[in-house]
């Protein structure tokens, strides 16, 4: 019997458990009523009187040893499980999800890069403006309909403070604070009091360029825009200019780019014309120079402004303006990862 006790001691010394359940299994195996050690106690009854003392002590010691060992295993495992150490650290981790750039930012960055390559410097201006920077200095007559409550958001009751309706206001800041040659490009949010639908929103984004120096001509404007169109839409892109009117440019033009969806053959995006309108532009009106203190005899310049949403719609095939501002991740996830 002493032999058997020795064997069991050795066996118990080596036991391991990977979970609380396994430890409980070991307790049942050795210490429950039908366990290995309980069996020894039963056998003990048949031990001869002269051996009782020695074997009795040995069985008791073994029982204590087994209890202690199994308790220790269980406590260790319980602690691990409550602290979360029970996890398998060799499993591959869950990768952190990166955000994606907003389509407006992607297009904005791409367009700014193109103009930066031409030597334009990025400038910014405020979204809350005064009448002078949005309208007055840009040669809008006092009764021009753009000032109307229908088109412009005014801040409280002061008709002088309003949300800019175009980024041309930044041109005025640049002309007031910089000396020619000026070559700036700006971007930002603009606001118009429009009913929201798939094709109109009360808030959208523009990019605006301004170039003032001696002898800047309409040919410079045209060449700049051709370069932009080919860089952005591809080598085969063409532009056409249609005469237009803006109070702050003379002459003025609206610019169409050949439809990048059908290659100019005509489709429902370009309404079968083969052309898509992308921007307004013109030569800076001398009145505008004078309003901001630039000598209109010495300097000429051009300006252009384009809507980022519209261009992003063409680039990504987006068909509803409202999607840009709803922040639905199913929409946002479709664009370039921000890394
Ligand atoms: N500000 C004009 C608009 O919002 C665009 C424009 C910019 C036109 C610069 C000419 C020159 O429609």
Image (cartoon, grey):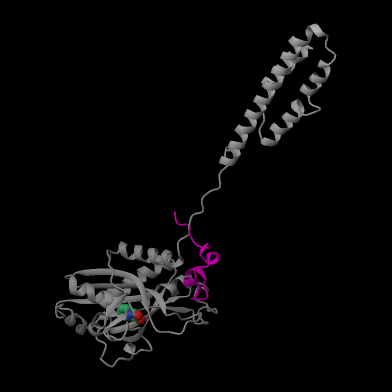
Q: Which residue is nearer to you in this view: 302 or 293?
A: 293
- At 62% across and 34% down in the image, what residue appears? 77
Residue 275: give x, y in percent of width and height.
46, 79
Residue 123 forms part of the magenta stretch: no
Residue 170 horizontal side relative to residue 235, left or right: left
Residue lying at the far bottom of the rendered structure: 143
The number of discs equals 0
The image quarter in which residue 228 lies: bottom left
Instruction: Note whether 91 is above or below 162 in the view shown.
Output: above
Predominant secondary structure in magenta? loop
Q: Which residues are magenta?
A: 315-339
Image quarter in which the N terminus is found: top right
Residue 42: give x, y in percent of width and height.
83, 20
Residue lying at the far right of the rendered structure: 46
Locate ligand 1 by image quadrant. Answer: bottom left
Q: Does the image show residue 214? A: no
The image quarter in which residue 338 lies: bottom left
The image quarter in which residue 45 lies: top right
Q: Which residue is nearer to you in this view: 67 or 142?
A: 67
Residue 271 horizontal side relative to residue 242, left or right: right
- At 79% across and 23% down in the image, what residue appears? 38
């Amino acid at each position: 019997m002493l032999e058997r006790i020795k064997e069991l001691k050795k066996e118990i010394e080596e036991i391991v458990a990977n979970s609380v359940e396994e430890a409980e299994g070991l307790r049942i195996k050795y210490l429950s009523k039908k366990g290995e050690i309980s069996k020894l106690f039963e056998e003990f009854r048949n031990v001869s009187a002269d051996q009782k003392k020695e074997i009795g002590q040995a069985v008791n010691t073994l029982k204590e040893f087994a209890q202690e060992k199994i308790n220790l295993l269980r406590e260790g495992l319980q602690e691990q499980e409550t602290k979360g150490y029970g996890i398998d650290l060799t499993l591959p981790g869950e990768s952190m999800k990166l955000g994606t750039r907003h389509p407006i930012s992607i297009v904005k960055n791409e367009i700014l890069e193109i103009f930066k390559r031409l030597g334009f410097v990025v400038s910014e201006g405020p979204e809350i403006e005064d009448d002078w920077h949005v309208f007055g200095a840009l040669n809008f007559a006092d009764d021009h309909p753009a000032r109307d409550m229908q088109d412009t958001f005014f801040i409280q009751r002061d008709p002088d403070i309003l949300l800019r309706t175009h980024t041309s206001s930044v041109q005025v800041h640049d002309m007031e604070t910089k000396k020619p040659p000026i070559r700036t490009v700006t971007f930002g949010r603009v606001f118009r009091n429009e009913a929201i639908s798939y094709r109109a929103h009360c808030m959208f984004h523009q990019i605006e360029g301004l170039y003032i120096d001696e002898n800047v001509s309409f040919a410079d404007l045209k060449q700049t825009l051709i370069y932009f169109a080919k860089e952005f839409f591809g080598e085969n892109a063409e532009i056409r200019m249609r005469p237009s009117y803006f109070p702050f440019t003379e002459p003025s033009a609206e610019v169409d780019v050949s439809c990048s969806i059908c290659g100019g053959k005509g489709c429902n995006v370009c309404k079968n014309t083969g052309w898509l309108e992308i921007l307004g532009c013109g030569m800076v009106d001398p009145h505008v120079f004078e309003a901001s203190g630039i000598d209109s005899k010495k300097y000429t310049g051009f300006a252009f402004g384009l809507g980022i949403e519209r261009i992003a719609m063409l680039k990504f095939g987006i068909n509803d303006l409202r999607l840009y501002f709803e922040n639905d991740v199913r929409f946002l996830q479709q664009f370039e990862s921000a890394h």
